[in-house]
Structure formats: C-alpha cells, structure tokens
C-alpha cells in the first residue's frame, strides 16, 4: 500500500514555493564557521525546510488562514483532518530517521536538538494561540519570548546542527563565536517575525498574496498591538477589533489609519531598522569586517519593507493592487 499519499498536504505546501530563507541562513552559518564544504549541509537544509513547511500546515489550521504564498492553504485543498495528520506524520518520520541521515557520532545529540526545537516551537505557537484566544495583549518581553521560541527556533536549530557537523571535519567553534552566532540567530528571528507582522498591514505586495490586512481578520495579537498597548494600555482598538465578527474593508482602512496616526506603524518600521543594524553589527564582530556579506545584502533585499503608506492613499493603492 502506498502511504506516501498521506503526505500530500505537506508536499503541496513545500511545492508552493517560499523564500528559502532558513536554508540560506544554514549556508551562511556554515561559511561563518569555516564549514562551507560540509557534505551534510544539504541534509540540514532539507530537514529545516521540512520542519518549516510542517509548521506552516499546522499554523494555517490553528490560525484559520486561507491563503499561503498566494495559493489556497493545504487544509483548504485537502481538509483539516488529513492536513493535520500529514504534518505530524512527516514530523515523526523525520525524527525516526535521524540516525539514517546523520553520522553515528552526532546522531544522539542531533535527535535531542530536534526534540528540543519542536518543544520550543510548540511553546511559541501555543502562546500565540493562547493570547489570541484570550484576547490578551502581551508585554514586549513576552512577545519577544514567543518569537524566540516560535520563529527563532528553526534558525537556532539550524545553527546548532552546523556546529555539530563542523566537529566531524575537525572544526572547533569557540564559545565566543557560538555565542555571537546564537545572538545573530535571535536577531534574525525577531527581525523576520516583526517584519512579517509589519508587512501584513503595510505592504501592497503582501496584500496581493494574502489579502488586505489579513491579521485584522484573524484578530491576531501581533507586534503592532504590543507596541500600541505599551503606548496606551487603555487603548480599545484591539477590543473593538475582537468585538467585530467580520471586519469590512472600510473598517480595516479605519484601523490602519488609527495605527498610522498613533505612530505605531512608524515605530515598528524604526524598530526593524534597529534590528537590521544589530544584525549587521554582530556579523561585523564575527567577520572582522565593516562590510556586510553578500548573504546579508541578499537577505535584506528578499525581506524588504517600506515606510507605512499615508492612509489618504490606501484606497488608491488597494485598487491598484486588485487590478494587478
């Protein structure tokens, strides 16, 4: 019996494309530690890519997302039960076969790294779901903790797998370099998630793929609302959003304008610029150069973002988005 068909929802998600950011980060880390020619790099990239797409299938179900990468989500095509089963089956297969993919010298450590990363991912995703369910806006520290577990865990896992495989080539990564790379992975994870929250509300390119301000539909507790709550804990915008069963386009435009006028979108943009600077500074410390690597140039180009659009221009921008 061919049971591979049970994995079709995960295959569909993998084949839908993506930016391959995590795979590129793994190559980047291997180069930073002088391990660029390691033959296990491709295996690490494949495993991280599988874990990422597994998480997307599950996250889209939990978040009620309908579009992913401009296409219908896996659960819209295959149904929730089969999609959920496919994601966990693929995950169990990956864990079961660690010893077949990695040399015996590191397979025990590698297995533990995968298990620890999966636990972290579920903690981060659990917090994200819990906050949205309870309509609770976390503190900034709580939100960053969620990011480090949910989004950062695959960057952290990838870098630790790189450290383990380096040993096989006789490369000893110093504690100082490990600490700097782990710090770099934290900054990259936070930049990645905060930028995702930001472009969801501000990027016409993103709107074409997932719809206008989709996070408003999901009532998502994003970084944006965390900043708004920090500025005024009595602000009622999020409660107003949660009290609306179906958010109209006009209401979304109004909410966007409110966040714009409160300078929350501007502050998020500034914070992204700060994280970009932090990432560059840590890389400079690792490379001993004031010039950024080709990887970072490409990374920031792929993950572009722009200052928020003036609310006066939103309707015109939306019309252009729908026509393109």
Image: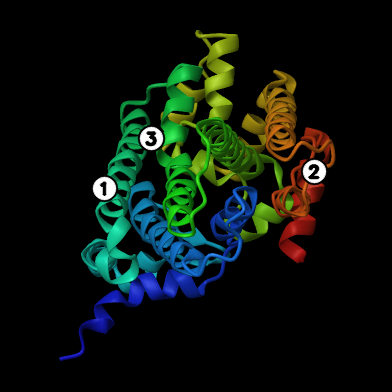
Where disc 1 sits, the SS reads helix
Disc number for residue 292: 2
Residue at mark 1 to residue at mark 2: CA–CA distance: 33 Å
The relative height of residue 234 versus residue 154 in the rendered view (above or below) is above
Residue at mark 1 to residue at mark 3: CA–CA distance: 24 Å
Circle 1: is it few (<14), some (14-19), or many (20+) Cα within 10 Å?
Answer: few
Disc number for residue 112: 1
Residue 95 at what x, y percent from top left?
25, 61
Q: Earlier in the sequence, mark 1 or mark 2?
A: 1
Give the mark toward the camera: 2 or 3. 2
Disc number for residue 128: 3
Residue 20 at what x, y percent from top left?
58, 62
Give the mark toward the camera: 1 or 3. 1
Residue at mark 2 to residue at mark 3: CA–CA distance: 33 Å
Left-right relation of 152 to 84? right
Q: Earlier in the sequence, mark 2 or mark 3?
A: 3
Left-right relation of 54 to 143? left
What residue appears at the point 26 percent right and 48 percent down from the top-left corner?
112
Q: Quadrant of the N terminus?
A: bottom left
Where disc 2 sits, the SS reads loop
Give the quadrant of residue 117: top left
């Amino acid at each position: 019996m061919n049971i591979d068909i049970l994995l079709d929802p995960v295959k569909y998600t993998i084949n839908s494309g993506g930016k391959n950011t995590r795979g590129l980060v793994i190559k980047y880390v291997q180069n930073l530690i002088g391990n660029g020619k390691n033959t296990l790099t491709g295996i690490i990239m494949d495993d991280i890519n599988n874990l990422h797409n597994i998480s997307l299938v599950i996250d889209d179900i939990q978040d009620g997302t309908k579009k992913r990468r401009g296409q219908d989500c896996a659960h819209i095509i295959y149904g929730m039960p089969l999609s959920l089963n496919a994601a966990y089956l693929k995950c169990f297969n990956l864990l079961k076969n660690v010893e077949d993919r990695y040399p015996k010298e590191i397979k025990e450590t590698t297995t533990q790294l995968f298990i620890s990363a999966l636990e972290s991912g579920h903690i981060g995703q659990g917090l994200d779901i819990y906050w949205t369910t309870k309509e609770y806006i976390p503190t900034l520290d709580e939100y960053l903790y969620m990011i480090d577990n949910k989004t950062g865990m695959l960057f952290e896992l990838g870098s630790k797998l790189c450290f383990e495989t380096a040993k096989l080539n006789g490369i000893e990564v110093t504690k100082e370099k490990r600490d700097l790379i782990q710090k770099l992975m934290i900054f990259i994870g936070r930049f990645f998630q905060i930028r995702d929250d930001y472009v969801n509300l501000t990027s016409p390119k993103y709107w074409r793929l997932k719809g206008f301000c989709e996070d408003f539909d999901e009532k998502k507790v994003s970084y944006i609302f965390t900043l708004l709550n920090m500025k005024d804990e009595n602000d009622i915008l999020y409660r107003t959003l949660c009290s609306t069963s179906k958010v109209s386009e006009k209401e979304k435009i109004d909410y966007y304008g409110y966040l714009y006028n409160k300078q929350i979108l501007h502050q998020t943009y500034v914070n992204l610029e700060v994280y970009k600077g932090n990432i560059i500074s840590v890389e400079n410390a690792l490379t001993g150069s004031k010039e950024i690597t080709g990887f970072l140039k490409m990374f920031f180009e792929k993950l572009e973002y722009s200052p928020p659009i003036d609310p006066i221009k939103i309707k015109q921008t939306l019309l252009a988005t729908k026509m393109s």
